[in-house]
Image: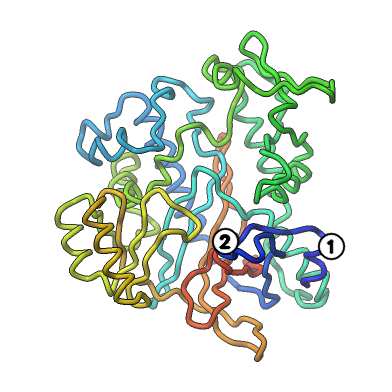
Amino acid sequence: AEQELYNLGITFTVYSDKDAIDRILPFDLVPRILTQPEWRHVEAGVKQRVKALNMFLWDIYHDQNVLKDGVIPRELVVGNSNFCHAMMGLDVPGGTYIHIDGTDLVRDETGRFLVLEDNGRTPSGVSYVIENRHTTLRVMPDIASGIDLMPVDEYGMRLQNALSEVAPEGVDNPQVVLLSPGIYNSAYFEHVFLAREMGVPLVEGRDLVTENDRVYMPFDPSSMLGVPGLVQAYRKGNVTIANAIGTGVADDKAVYAYMPRIIQYYLSEEPILSNVETHICAEPEGLAYTLANLDKLVVKPVGESGGYGLLIGPHATKEELSDFSRKLKDDPANYISQPVVQLSVCPTLCETGLENRHVDLRPFAVTGRDTWVLPGGLSRVALKRGSLVVNSSQGGGSKDTWVLAS
C-alpha cells in the first residue's frame, strides 16, 4: 500500500517534524465500516449544519439580525480576525458561501456522533478519501467482493456541477478553474487531484488576468502577470470564488460553541448532530471553569487548525499547565475549552498486529443549489498507542471508510 501511495505522489506536510516535512500519507488497510442507518444520520446532520452556516454567513454580511437578536455576541463576529468587512452587502451567487465543507465528527462512549469542529474555509483531505478506496481495491482486490458499498468516485463530478450551479448571473456555460499557490503548497497533490477529477484547468496566479472587472486565462505561457483585480471582479459579480471570502468566521472555535443556537435561529430545528460541550474563555464563567479544571480539559486556540497550539490537560506536565494558565489569563478571548472526548476506536494494523486506535471522521459536503455529502468521508486515525491526536499534520494517518449500501 505504501508503494502505491509513493508511486502516486500522495504526500502531505508534517510541520511538527523538523527532520521529515514531506511524507507519504500514512494509510491503514483495515477499513472503517458504517451502516446505512448510521450514515443517513450523519448525512442529515451535515446537510443541516451546512445550510445553517450559509444562512449565518449571509446574515452577518447583510442585515446582521443574528447579532441584533443577541443569538451570538456581536464582538465575537465583527471582531473576528476572519470577518471580512469588504464582504458587507455583497450578494454571493446562490447565497452560498461554503461550497465545500468538511465537518469533523467524533463518536463518544455512548456511540453518538458529535461535531468537534467545522471546516468551511479550506477543508482538505477529500483526495485521500478517494485514493484510499482505490488503494484498498488495488492492494486487496477481493476484500470487498460481495459487499455492496456506496461509491466515492462521484465527488469530482458533483463538485464541478455544484460550482457550475453557482456561476455568476447570466453565465450559462461557466469556466471553472482551480487556483493553486503552486507546487510548494502542502496540499498541491489535492489541487492536482481535484482539477483532474473535475476536468478543469489547474492554474496559478500568473495564469490569470483581469480586464474590465472580468477574469481571463491568457494563453501566453511567458506572461508573468498575476491576478490583481480578482476581488473587484468578484464584487462586480463576474466571478464566483469557492469558498467565499470571509467564510473563516464560521470556522472559529468560539462561534462553533453557538452553533446549536444558530441552527435553531435559522431553521427552527434542533441540531441533528450535537456539539461537544464547550466553554468560551472570553466569558468570565468559561475562563473560571477552564482554569479550575485545566488538567481535565482540552484547550484550543480559536483561530488555529491542524491540531496546533492546543493543550490536552490529562497528558500535560505541570510546567505545561502552568504556562497555559498564564496564556489563558493574558488572552482569554483566544481560547475555548472542551472535555476530553474518548474517541471511538477501530482495529488498525500496527507493527505488532491488529490493535485498536482512536479515530474521527470528516465527511465532505458540496453545495450548489443543493447539498450533497460524499458517502463515508475521511477516517483519520491516531497511529500512536493511546494518542487522541488524529491530524495528519501531527503524524496521524487515515483509513478507507466504507458505507454499506443496505
> For numbered disc 1, what is the local secondary structure?
helix
User: Which residue is labeled 2 in the image?
Assistant: 393
Q: Are marks 2 and 1 in contact (CB under 8 Å)?
A: no
- At label 1, counting other C-alpha atoms closer than 10 Å, the crowd grade (few under 14, some 14-19, many 20 or more) is few
Q: Amino acid at mark 2?
A: Ser
18 relative to 79 in the view: left or right? right
User: Which residue is labeled 1 in the image?
Assistant: 7
| Quadrant showing the N terminus | bottom right
Q: Amino acid at mark 1?
A: Asn
284 relative to 338 in the view: left or right? left
Is 273 in front, or is 248? 248
The structure residue drawn at horizontal position 25% and vertical position 60%, both measured from the top left corner, is: 326
Residue 335: x %, y % from top left: 31, 54
| Quadrant showing the C terminus | bottom right
Which disc, if any, is residue 88?
none
215 relative to 166 in the view: left or right? right
The structure residue drawn at horizontal position 75% and vertical position 74%, both measured from the top left corner, is: 144
- At label 2, counting other C-alpha atoms closer than 10 Å, the crowd grade (few under 14, some 14-19, many 20 or more) is many
**Residue 3 visible in image:** yes
Is 380 in front, or is 173? 380
